[in-house]
Image (cartoon, grey):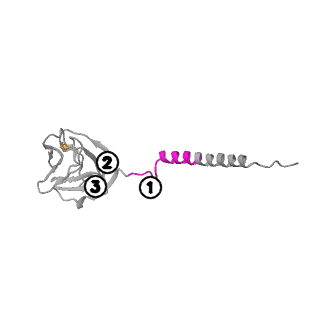
Amino acid sequence: MEKKPISRRSFLNKVWVALGLVAGAELVAGTVAWFRPRKDKAGGEQQESIFAAGPVDQFERGSVNAFVKGRFYLVRLEDGGFLALSRTCTHLSCTVPWVADENRFMCPCHSSVFDIKGDVIDPPAPRAMDLFDVRIEGGIVRVDTSKRTKRLAFAPGQATYAETV
Ligand code: FES
């Protein structure tokens, strides 16, 4: 049986088809990988929204600590309760800094002022600073930034307290 020689054009066509298939497979694999949930190093689902802020005793009463990565302030009230306040202004979403000398949050954009509990002292902000969930587990304060709670004003039930034994 005599073999038919492959023409240069036919050979190049096959190479292009093969390259096209490889590129298509890469595109499909990349798309699937993009939509898959990422795993952390321990093999679990990522929980970047949960922040271990630190041990309860690390936070003085009447203090405000900024967590830049989590975009929140952890407030410890004078009575020992904790609040996690979003640093986003409830007026038009500027970042609100804590001004320790004034003992207030003061928005640089339109001058809204909030007290340590996030309540509005001076508008135009229409409501108190948003809250994130706070949990205290094993003496560690944890903040879940995936759960934002809007509120008009502070109420005592919003604070989280460490269990006293
Ligand atoms: Fe804060 Fe307007 S964005 S006062």
Q: Nearer the viewer, residue 59 or 38?
A: 38
Name the element at disc 1. Answer: loop
Q: Residue at x 25, y 45 (%)?
A: 131
- Answer yes or no: is residue 165 visible: no
Which of disc 1 and disc 2 is earlier in sequence?
1
Return the residue at label 2.
145
Return the residue at label 1.
40
Residue 149 in the figure: left or right of residue 2: left
| Mark 2 burial class by Cα count in 10 Å: few <14, some 14-19, many 20+ | many
- The residue at the far bottom in this view is 58
- The residue at the far front in this view is 8
Residue 69 in the figure: left or right of residue 81: right
| Mark 1 burial class by Cα count in 10 Å: few <14, some 14-19, many 20+ | few
Name the element at disc 2. Answer: strand
Amino acid under label 3?
Answer: Val
Name the element at disc 3. Answer: loop
Q: Nearer the viewer, residue 136 or 47?
A: 47
Q: Residue at x 55, y 45 (%)?
A: 28
In the image, the segment drawn in magenta is 25-47
Distance, label 3 to label 2, CA atoms, is 12 Å
Q: Residue at x 68, y 49 (%)?
A: 12
Return the residue at label 3.
68
